[in-house]
Amino acid sequence: MGSIGFIGLGIMGKPMASNLLKAGKSLIVYDIAAAPMKELAALGAELAENPAGLVAPMVNVIPYLIYLQSSTIGLPRINKFP
């Protein structure tokens, strides 16, 4: 399996992403806040510049978003799922 894209690094998303990194998974992460991205980069995550850049090459994406409208900004490939 290749890298996993993880969008949304808030109260629940950041610990989940951290656990995936600790389990040896390769992650590319994005959040609107820089601080959790920097914390996960220190653990080995690759940082995406924007959501669309994260989604484009991914097979597996975990969008952990609190607001539905967040999933429609720059994520055209995710929006095709039911």
Image (spheres, rainbow, N blue to C red):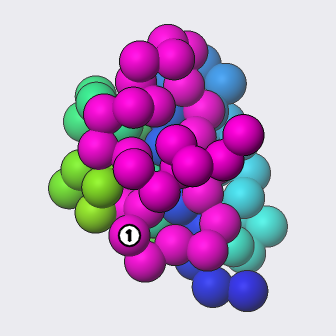
Judge from the rendering whether residue 13 lies leftward or rightward of residue 42; answer left or right.
right
Name above or below for residue 56 compared with residue 18: below
Image quadrant assignment for residue 12? top right
User: Camera-side residue: 7 or 76?
Assistant: 76
Q: Is residue 42 visible?
A: no
Q: Amino acid at mark 1?
A: Ala
- Magenta residues? 54-82
| Image coords of residue 38 (percent x, y) | 32, 47
User: Which residue: 30% across, 55% down?
Assistant: 52
| Image coords of residue 13 (percent x, y) | 61, 33
| Image coords of residue 11 (percent x, y) | 59, 19
Q: Which residue is mark 1?
A: 56
User: Which residue: 39% across, 32% down?
Assistant: 72
Judge from the rendering whether residue 10 lies leftward or rightward of residue 37; answer left or right.
right
Name above or below for residue 25 compared with residue 15: below
| Image coords of residue 51 (percent x, y) | 33, 49
User: Which residue: 20% across, 56% down?
Assistant: 49
Image quadrant assignment for residue 29? bottom left
Magenta span contains residue 56: yes
